[in-house]
Image: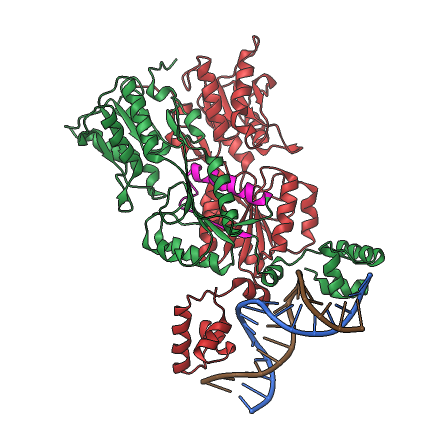
Chain colours: A red, B green, C brown, D blue
Amino acid sequence: MSTMEEIAEKAGVSQATVSRVINGHSGVSERKRKLVMEWARKLDYQPNRTAQSLKNNKSNLIGLIISDISNPYFAEIVHAVEKEAAKNGYNIILCNTENNIQKEKESINTLRSRQVEGILIVPSDKSAPHLKSIKKLNLPFVVITQISDLFASVAVDHAKGGEMVVKHLSDLGHTKIGYIGPLKYAGYTEDKFEGYKSGLKKSNLEFNSEYIIETDGGMPELSSQNAYKKVNQFLNQANSSLATAYFAYNDLAAFEAIKAFEDHNYKVPEDIAIAGFDNTSLAQINRPGLTTISQPIKTIGHVGLNMLFDKINKNKDDENIILEPQLIVRESTLKYRRS
Amino acid sequence: MSTMEEIAEKAGVSQATVSRVINGHSGVSERKRKLVMEWARKLDYQPNRTAQSLKNNKSNLIGLIISDISNPYFAEIVHAVEKEAAKNGYNIILCNTENNIQKEKESINTLRSRQVEGILIVPSDKSAPHLKSIKKLNLPFVVITQISDLFASVAVDHAKGGEMVVKHLSDLGHTKIGYIGPLKYAGYTEDKFEGYKSGLKKSNLEFNSEYIIETDGGMPELSSQNAYKKVNQFLNQANSSLATAYFAYNDLAAFEAIKAFEDHNYKVPEDIAIAGFDNTSLAQINRPGLTTISQPIKTIGHVGLNMLFDKINKNKDDENIILEPQLIVRESTLKYRRS
DNA sequence: GTGAAAGCGCTAACAA
DNA sequence: TTGTTAGCGCTTTCAC
């Protein structure tokens, strides 16, 4: 890669002049400007952003830490964030933690070392102690997809989403409404499960632990077949008492649950209604179309990154933006004839 | 962020000594070593990788250019590459081109500016002219998911995959086998379509253009509903003559096609068999399970990145690694009773 | 309008 | 064992 020094030599000017031309500063004679531009083109000059970063103390880099990029929902977020960043002249260093706290810690340190101007994170565990020490760093830091009590954050109200699903199922006449998903989230309550419970209460339905099918949380690789396995196990128990409708904590789990129920000769939605959470692109492609809660992914990515920019420019205090979940009703909870 | 200079001052040693300690070089007295370590810890020192990069002329950064990260298949690749890179002490700058050649060009230049040591790319168009000029740059460059005649590359043999699908369908007794997908790929032939045609030939079946449902290529956003729309249009035409089996060029298109067929009261696979390509995680979750071609994603990511490392270390010439596709048979092409 | 020079944080060669 | 120094490529101040 050529440098300003090389261009300067070729063009017979000083390196400072080359810098002025490349950066479009005024006060350079037209003759030299042209000469420099000419040589820059000939040598296919690309400014060294590393040197610029060092000198300017500005990297135009932001760190994006994702818990599990294999999940299409998070992939969509990466998409939205990268797009918005590029539009603002920023690049993204991507770190995937696979829901591993240790990796998350390391990623944060690496990104700091890389002089990112800020970090956008989907935390593995929003209450992990290591996050508290970041607070002191005064490193712009925005949490997305979960509401944080420590940092600025943008997320949908998960509990409310859970309530909405229960209300929908209850409105359809279901009184035995179950839940498929983790009950805890890295030691803390899982908001969707809380929403499920408060939703039952609002519909004057009893909480019945028999209708709960607990799965592991979002461990990658594992998660893939976990909901299927758990539902399957549940159905194999002789004395399992079934609900007539289930709320699965995300779309992937819902799909797996449907598969497990159908493999046991229950029809969805005729015998059992199922709803998910996330409205991934598959929710509408799948047969039956999946009733689910839509999270405004693009908004989360877009708003999250802009909050980060605001913090970088020191214009803003921490703020938690809670977005409204939206219920998308499809065939999986409706009486639906398979042609 | 603290610097070596600050530590040096606190510890009462020279900045060079701090550097020696931080980098674990020998020849520092135990006393000073401890002192420096102590202060580094206290000040939460993180080495400035930008300065290191500039000095060492080594960034430990690689660029990853993806055409469409919303596609779960590509997201899996990002996952595999990031993991392998992290294991080797590298970070990833991610650029998503949305299949836009202009963005691809800009991404390459940005990454060069960022001093990445090499680029791993899923090109929007493997034959685009701008790629030729990269050849001269002697920038380590590896193409993945497609075989390149210009660069080192790692991919599955798409044409062969197409052939395998056709053979499978033909073996099942189908004689009217159709294709759903783009016919061209940015002006060039789509390998899967070529494979489809040669597969027909090998099974002694006539090519019949009536069985072709052409869709747009992989434009993001658009692609989402494109196959559904095209199949739907096709079925609405009074005089459409249907095949009994279709090969869809990727899983997403296959899902959409299934939806369209079912919306027109055709059952899959009883009335029409459908196969996809990619073996995305949904292929097995979906009902019916989708017969598809599996690409060894992790292998592609893993091998691709290691080829790039080899090129960075100047140990290797260009090489094209062609991986074997694998047919995964599921319900969508078999006689399958929906419970 | 232009060039010389300092300095961003670091590594490594050299000297002591 | 330790400190001094040059220099990576760039931006910017200062002097001419």
Q: Position of residue B2 (x, y in %)?
A: 70, 60
Identify which residue, B90 or A173, lies in the foreground: B90
Quadrant showing the C terminus of chain A = top left
Residue farthest top in this picture: A238
Above or below — where is A51 with respect to A287?
below
Can you tell which quarter of the image residue B71 is in? top left
Q: Where is residue A105 in the image (x, y as percent from the top left)?
A: 65, 45
- Does any portion of residue A295 appear in the rendered image? no
Identify which residue, A191 or A125, lies in the foreground: A125
Above or below — where is B49 with respect to B159?
below
Position of residue B134 in the picture relative to residue B271 (left or right): right
Q: Where is residue A108 in the image (x, y as percent from the top left)?
A: 63, 49
Can you tell which quarter of the image residue B228 is in? top left
Residue A140 is inside the magenta segment: no
- Does any portion of residue A212 appear in the rendered image? yes
Q: Position of residue A212 (x, y in %)?
A: 57, 21
Position of residue B164 in the picture relative to residue A27 (left or right): left
| Callout count | 0
Residue B71 is inside the magenta segment: yes
Residue farthest left in this picture: B239
Q: What residue range appears in magenta?
A: B61-87
Identify which residue, A99 or A4, lies in the foreground: A4
Above or below — where is A234 with respect to B222?
above
User: Residue shown at 25%/25% (left/top)?
Assistant: B264
Above or below — where is A154 with respect to B248?
below
Position of residue A265 in the picture relative to residue A211 (left or right): left
User: Residue shown at 40%/17% (left/top)?
Assistant: A270
